[in-house]
């Protein structure tokens, strides 16, 4: 867990240093670095060696690892291959002219300056190259996919410009670093909000990953997770390949660090994604924005398209008659296209059928769950929250990271339903709902009430709930009562 380094000790002769490392079988890598207080003299640097045969004749067992210079003040070297079956490992450092160091590097094996050992340069397997190019392209373009049409929600398209940008970037990378394309690049997100990227050889191990993270973050990694929801990586040993743990180039790692403390930080799984309320704007299109969020890639700008879709679906279906809609289908289509008209149960049923998805609407005030599309054999379900006059989306995720939200679940995922109900209960306890049965209706200014037969009393009445909170006049569109009944209430 802890280590102690005394800079400059022991010195065995001017410009020569020796460090003895006990129990080398437990050591995977060593880090050698300048402390920063003193630099090498001009034209000099340090050569790094290790000796696994303590007591051998002088110079016969020392293996060259690499070099340090003022331009390269630190380096990581893998020593696990030298330490098997021995009780002691020596690390030697020699201050030498740059010309000597350059000669040593030229004569050394390819592993001397590599964080992770690599085999001598050979022509990569064509299949491996093709796989890497394909993976790189897929990982890039999936960030730019969008729905081709609301009428065909399963069809995803990528702008041609995106592919051209990927190609240009690939050529730049290969030109500047021909071998870099064959290495793994991983994105790293630290639990405290930091983000970075790291690079590893394609055959890197768990020990290699820990070492790189330690250097990159300047903190000891405690827990490392990947995927969404994040799954904790649990290797069997330090030499286990990352590929065996399901980690591949382009993946994102979520890391919890020790924060410099000698205690184990909580695992990331203790802060795993949970069901969250994603609020929609109060713009009379909350239902459509909510459906856009849960079914159209977390979009909050699909209301107009979804209104048009609802109108088209109703007009094309014999099931939505005047008896169901409360008005002729043609009139409904014109009405629902208006951006001041609210959506409700009819629209939820329409969208459930079109997207072949169960839509579970949870009423905050009563806790009732209405599942539109239930019993039709749909393989997926989304959750929305209804406050009485407003809809919001529910998503599995973490705060402030909506881009990673999961909004679609299997109908058999009981945990999703339980967590959605918990969100609704929290909202109820905070009284984040409107009880339509407890409205008080007041006339607005000096206006006279409308005559009987008027569709909407908007403009003549305002409403407040039992907490004396003003409700927008448009909410009268949601009241299932007639104008005459309004007069009785006012009486």
Image (tube, rainbow, N blue to C red):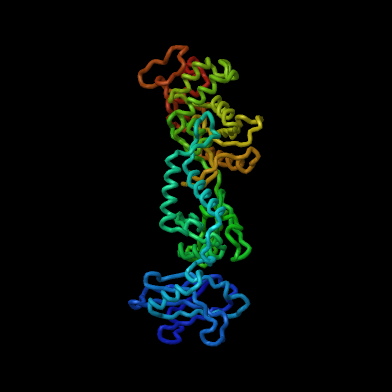
| Residue lying furthest left | 42
Residue 68: which quarter of the image? Answer: bottom left
Q: Nearer the viewer, residue 145 or 169?
A: 169
| Residue lying furthest top | 452
Query: Is any part of residue 328 visible from this angle?
Result: yes
Residue 318: which quarter of the image? Answer: top right
Task: Examine the rendered structure and indicate whether residue 281 appears above or below residue 329.
Answer: below
> Which percent across, then down, holds residue 491?
47, 17
Q: Nearer the viewer, residue 187 or 96?
A: 96
Task: Examine the rendered structure and indicate whether residue 15 appears above or below residue 459.
Answer: below
Residue visible at 48% across and 22% down in the picture: 336
Image quarter of the N terminus: bottom right
Q: Please state if 191 lies on the left or on the right of 269 as rendered.
A: left
Residue visible at 51% across and 69% down in the picture: 111
Residue visible at 49% across and 76% down in the picture: 64
Task: Examine the rendered structure and indicate whether residue 303 appears above or below residue 453.
Answer: below
């Amino acid at each position: 867990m802890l280590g102690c380094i005394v800079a400059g000790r022991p010195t065995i002769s001017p410009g020569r240093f020796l460090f003895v490392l006990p129990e080398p079988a437990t050591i995977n890598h060593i880090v050698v670095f300048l402390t920063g207080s003193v630099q090498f003299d001009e034209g000099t640097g340090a050569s790094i060696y290790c000796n696994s045969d303590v007591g051998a004749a002088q110079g016969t067992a020392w293996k060259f690892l690499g070099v340090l210079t003022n331009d390269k003040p630190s380096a990581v070297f893998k020593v696990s291959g030298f330490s098997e079956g021995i009780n002691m490992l020596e690390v030697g450092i020699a201050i030498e002219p740059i010309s000597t160091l350059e000669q040593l590097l030229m004569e050394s094996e390819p592993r001397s300056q590599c964080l992770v050992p690599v085999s001598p340069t050979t022509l990569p397997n064509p299949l491996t190259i093709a796989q890497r190019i394909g993976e790189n392209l897929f990982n890039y373009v999936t960030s730019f996919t969008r729905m081709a049409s609301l009428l065909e929600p399963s069809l995803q398209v990528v702008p041609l410009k995106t592919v051209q940008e990927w190609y240009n970037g690939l050529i730049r990378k290969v030109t500047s670093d021909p071998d870099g394309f064959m290495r793994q690049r991983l994105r790293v997100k630290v639990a405290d909000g930091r983000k970075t990227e790291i690079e590893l050889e394609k055959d890197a191990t768990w020990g290699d990953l820990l070492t790189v993270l330690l250097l990159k973050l300047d903190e000891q990694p405690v827990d490392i997770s990947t995927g969404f929801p994040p799954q904790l990586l649990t290797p069997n040993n330090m030499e286990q390949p990352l590929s065996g743990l399901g980690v591949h180039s382009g993946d994102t790692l979520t890391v919890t660090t020790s924060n410099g403390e000698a205690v184990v930080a909580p695992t990331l799984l203790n802060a795993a994604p949970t069901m969250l309320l994603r609020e929609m704007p109060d713009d009379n299109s909350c239902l459509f924005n909510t459906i856009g969020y849960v079914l159209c890639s977390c979009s909050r700008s699909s209301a107009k398209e979804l209104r048009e879709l609802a109108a088209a679906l109703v007009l094309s279906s014999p099931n939505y008659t005047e008896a169901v809609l409360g008005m002729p289908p043609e009139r409904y289509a014109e009405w629902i296209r208006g951006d001041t008209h609210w959506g409700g149960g009819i629209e939820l049923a329409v969208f459930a059928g079109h997207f072949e998805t169960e839509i579970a609407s949870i009423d905050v005030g009563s806790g009732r769950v209405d599942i539109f599309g239930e019993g039709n054999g749909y393989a997926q379900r989304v959750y929305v929250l209804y406050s009485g006059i407003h809809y919001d989306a529910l998503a599995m995720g973490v705060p402030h990271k909506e881009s990673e939200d999961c909004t679609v679940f299997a109908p058999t995922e009981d945990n999703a339903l339980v967590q959605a109900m918990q969100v609704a209960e929290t909202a109820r306890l905070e009284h984040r709902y409107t009880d339509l049965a407890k409205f008080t209706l007041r006339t607005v200014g000096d206006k006279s009430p409308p005559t009987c037969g008027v569709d909407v009393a908007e403009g003549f009445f305002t409403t407040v709930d039992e907490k004396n909170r003003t409700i927008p006049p448009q909410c009268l569109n949601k009241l299932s009562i007639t104008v005459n009944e309004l007069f009785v209430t006012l009486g």
